[in-house]
Amino acid sequence: MAAKFATPVWCSRALLAAGAVTLLFSMTGCSSMSSSLSDSVSSPFKWSSDSSSKSSEGDKEAYQGDIRDYTAAYVRSSSDIEAFRRGLASLAAKHGITNWEADQGTYLGIGEGLGKARVTAGQLEVYKAGFSGGDGVKASDIQKGYEKYRLVA
């Protein structure tokens, strides 16, 4: 008779993370597993910053676009808020933003990403509360980004 063993929690999380990485690699067309998760998520969005003009406005739009795309991918594939925050920090650093938590573009981009992911009104409220940390201004910016994306989509 074969013995049954309980699967450790870390093993389940590792399998979930591996599945998310596999999904992201299949979405991005990457064949190398040497990149970190945040690199694999952000790499398909480099075109936004590479093709934008050097103007401040173009840089802001590129950053928001990258945050939008990253958020939409995150919402569809993960629930690890800390991994999401690390990914935001990585994207911000690539755009030269040192305090992404205080940058309005971060929250507008998150809202646009939630719109792109087509979250329901109820889900939007949950994500707003979680991503804004209870800050009314950040929650308002997420709402604005969501509404903006839903109007143009």
Image (tube, rainbow, N blue to C red):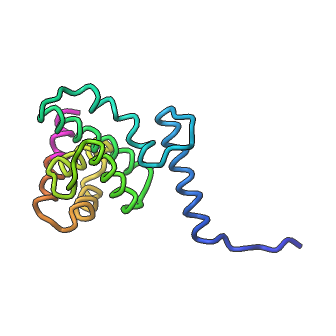
Could you say which quadrant of the image residue 14 lies in? bottom right
From this view, report whether residue 85 is shown above or below residue 4. Answer: above
Q: Is residue 55 left or right of residue 86?
A: left
Q: Position of residue 64 (x, y in %)?
A: 22, 41
Residue at figure coordinates x 53%, y 55% from the top left = 17
Q: Is residue 83 left or right of residue 145?
A: right
Q: Position of residue 105 (x, y in %)?
A: 17, 47
Q: Is residue 19 left or right of residue 50?
A: right
From this view, report whether residue 102 is shown above or below residue 59. Answer: below
- The segment highlighted magenta reads 145-153
Residue at figure coordinates x 44%, y 50% from the top left = 77
Could you say which quadrant of the image residue 63 lies in? top left
Magenta span: chief secondary structure: helix
Q: Nearer the viewer, residue 131 or 123?
A: 131
Residue at figure coordinates x 30%, y 43% from the top left = 94
Image quadrant containing the N terminus: bottom right
From this view, report whether residue 107 is shown above or below residue 53. Answer: below
Is 116 part of what is drawn in magenta? no
From this view, report whether residue 87 is shown above or below residue 149. Answer: below
Q: Position of residue 31 (x, y in %)?
A: 57, 34
Q: Is residue 7 left or right of residue 55?
A: right
Q: Nearer the viewer, residue 110 or 40?
A: 40
Report the number of numbered marks.
Answer: 0
Is 146 part of what is drawn in magenta? yes
Q: Position of residue 27 (x, y in %)?
A: 48, 36
Determine the residue located farthest toward the right in the rendered image.
1
Residue at figure coordinates x 39%, y 34% from the top left = 44
Q: Nearer the viewer, residue 124 or 55?
A: 55
Image quadrant containing the C terminus: top left
